[in-house]
Image (tube, rainbow, N blue to C red):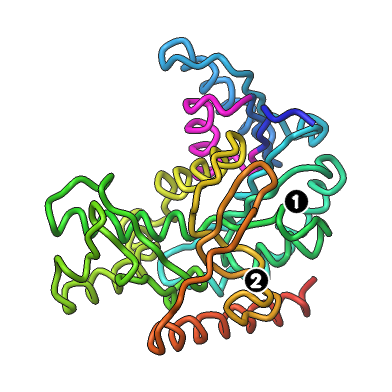
Amino acid sequence: MSINKITVVGAGNVGATTAHIAAGRKLGDIVLIDIVKGLAEGKALDMAEAGPVQGYSCKITGTTDWAAAVDSSIVVITSGLARKPGMSRDDLLAKNVQIVKSVSENVAKYCPNAIVIVVSNPLDAMVYVASKVTGFPKNRVMGMAGALDVARFCYFIASELNVSSEDIRGILMGGHGDDMVPLPRFTTVAGIPVTELLPKEKIAKMIERARKGGIEIVDLLGSSAYYAPAAGVVKMAEAITNNTHSMIPSCVYCDKEYNVGGYFVGVPAVLGKDGVEKIIELNLNAEECGQFDISVSHVKELAAKVDKLI
């Protein structure tokens, strides 16, 4: 298995942007797959032609043929319908279950040794679908949500404090949606807890904005976000490809951890060449535990719906 081949499924805004950022980060050769003939091919060619300007020379292939994905070390699943104004992530469930199921079947067939990163919404449910359909070990299936949600939270903090966003390290847990659980107690600015720098009321407003971050973009654009989600995916892929052992909040399988009981949910996780290498268990207080339990209960409800749809 090559460690230098990443397949991105779905050549829409998120998928194409993911492929472009990954190429720029020189993570390896890129395969972009889409069911629409010409879409992946055209975008891949455009990206390849940008290489001499941007300074990357990896092979970028656009195709409708899954055979091109053979020997991929990472497969990123972005396929699915995007949210429209007025739609919740849950509205997408039934249709996207079937799409991700079909994609996952191809992943299992053509890329049996790959690590899978799911981006499709509703995120927690789609990771569950990919895990069930591929049958891969749990450490090799994960979802990109925390990296995005934390980035939003950190950006809001940086803007409020007028400091570099690079100084901020955020932690966020739970499902990807309105009941996600940002943890200001564990969020720092150059090592200083944000709770020491901002009043509780302002932090609460930023938490609420982070929870609504996706729909804020949808209401402005008329479609889902793609620059920040793609950046989040590539951050995870880079940790895996380069075996950096980076701690990134991710949607991963938790059983005894946090007493989740065998579901995919957002927690701080260490990512490396084997996928999910370790889950970091924080000592949550009663309020944080309560919020996390509510979020997990929603994830479990989605999983139960998925079981009836697959």
Residue 186 within the magenta-colored segment of the rendering: no
Percent across and percent down for residue 17 are 48, 37
Which residue is at a point 58% across and 70% down the rendered structure image? 265
Residue to which mark 1 is pinned: 103
For image coordinates 20% across by 54% down, the residue present is: 158
Spatial separation of the CA atoms under disc 2 and disc 1: 24 Å
**Residue 282 as seen in the image, left or right of residue 242:** left
Decide: few, some or many residues near mark 1? Use Cα within 10 Å; few <14, some 14-19, many ≥20. many
Taking the spot 61% from the left edge, 35% from the top edge, the residue there is: 241
Relative to residue 293, is residue 98 depicted above or below?
above
Closer to the N terminus: mark 2 or mark 1?
A: 1
Q: How many marks?
A: 2
Q: Nearer the viewer, residue 289 or 14?
A: 289
User: Residue at 71% of width from left, 42% of height from top?
Assistant: 35
Q: Position of residue 156 (x, y in %)?
A: 24, 59
Image location (x, y in percent) of residue 49? 51, 14
Range shown magenta = 8-28
For label 2, the residue is: 254
Image vertical order of residue 122 relative to residue 245, above or below: below
* Camera-nearest residue between 183 and 233: 183
Q: Are marks 2 and 1 in contact (CB under 8 Å)?
A: no
Q: Amino acid at mark 1?
A: Val
* Quarter holding residue 111: top right
